[in-house]
Image (cartoon, grey):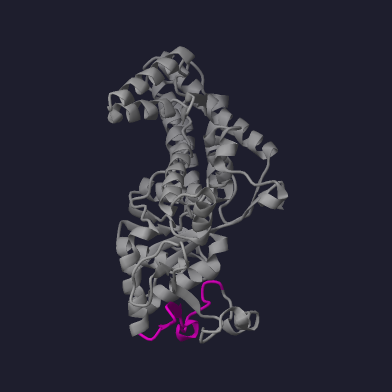
Amino acid sequence: MKLYNTLTKKKEEFKPIEEGKVRMYVCGPTVYNYIHIGNARPMIMFDTVRRYFEYKGYDVNYVSNFTDVDDKIIKKAVEEGVSTTEVTARYIDAVKEDMKNLNVRPATVHPMATQEIDGMVTMIQTLIDKGYAYAKNGTVYFKTRSFEGYGKLSKKNIDDLEAGARIAVSDEKDDPMDFVLWKPKKDGEPYWESPWSQGRPGWHIECSVMSKKYLGDQIDIHAGGEDLIFPHHENEIAQSEAANGKDFAKYWLHNGFLNIDNKKMSKSEGNFFTVREIGAEYPYEVLRFFMLNVHYRSPINFSRELMESAKNALERIKNAVSNLAHLSENATEKEMTEEEKTFLDSVIALKAKFEAAMEDDFNTADAIAAIFEIVKTANTNLSADSAKQLLEETKNYIVTLADVLGVDVEVKEELLDTDIENLIQERQDARKNRDFKRSDEIRDLLLEKGIVLEDTREGVRWKRA
């Protein structure tokens, strides 16, 4: 298996730190609003990476954080006249629901920054003790020039960076390139105690601390969007390696940007879409499938035309699986002919082609192409006269490979409206009786059947995903 490593700018053979195990950290969202479709790309892609490792038999420890203390969160809380905790709790729940709809599996651990402050204070003190950081007037700064390898991920030269820096940004920094590890509170802001001031951590330190706590001093893979390469990931490397005295991550994976109709997504352009807004137009699985049709390192262009194309392509795979299921139900048990065995060998060869694509830096576009080759050859060559075993095995290969991509291509029996209403009423009754376990079971059952519930003041609304 070969991965393109941002650190070395080349593909490298994947060799885990510990045989059979993968330690993987993916930077998660700052929870002050609903996630947009740009946020969804790394969630979908690196969930797929995790799925492929598990498919190959690896034990994956997958950590993805929630940044739940930040200027934007504080601003949102002030605007709404609520606490920051209320804001973050609401949007963490929303992120989890969006992830579930996109078939993104929960991480092994989803740490929250506010629950890891003690570890951040400890690491900052370690950096001070080792001479990599200093405190001034309650703020702690990392001495960027003290870390010899600074710039090795982004390939930026620190002297060039300094030339472009505004020295007037802060009078108290020893160097304009130094960055904040801890900052004092402002009026009305949440804060924590520390040896330097009542305040809160800088953004970069949280991932270094959470990665160390849940994965160890050294990890196999650190991943996220390419916008995080500098300064966030560069600063993570500096902090972690300075504090721990070891190389931080062996492989750095970064996904490309997402554009809307060939333009950068922005609210000012009026082309900013949340996952939920697109989910109201298309099934969530179509958004996931669309994202995987482009190699993760390439920029991806979102448009309704391309979404329609993805929807139709996914439908072709589902139709093929449905047809194979129907044929196998009515097929007779008989030995496969030599010709059929040869055909099955060709399907197995296409499975190998799928795996080869995934092992070449997780080329999901080519992996999907291999699935379509199985679909095309099955549609052309298999019929009601084919051996039951051949039909079932061909179907199972398509279903299994699609599942590696997190796409469910088995068509489920659709619930009638009356069945849905009855289940919703049963859920309401369960909630009144405080039987929340049953209430959650019904909600999950409906979601599995493609029915999304929305609890409103006027009652429960539902829609087909």
Specify the quadrant that holds the N terminus.
Answer: bottom left
Q: Nearer the viewer, residue 380 or 214?
A: 214
> Would you identify the image quadrant in which residue 436 lies?
top left
Magenta span: 130-154
Q: Is residue 284 above or below residue 260?
A: above
On screen, residue 304 versus residue 78, left or right, reads right
Q: Nearer the viewer, residue 136 or 420?
A: 136
Q: Measuring from the top left, give residue 53's x and y in whole percent.
A: 39, 51
Q: Residue at (53%, 41%) from the top-left corner?
A: 288
On screen, residue 127 versus residue 202, left or right, reads left
On screen, residue 363 versus residue 133, left or right, reads right
Q: Measuring from the top left, give residue 124's x and y in whole percent.
A: 36, 75
Q: Is residue 364 visible?
A: yes
Q: Nearer the viewer, residue 426 or 132?
A: 426
Q: Is residue 320 visible?
A: no
Would residue 206 be counted in the magenta stretch?
Answer: no
Q: Measuring from the top left, give residue 377's x and y in whole percent.
A: 55, 30
Q: Residue at (36%, 55%) from the top-left corner?
A: 111
Circle count: 0
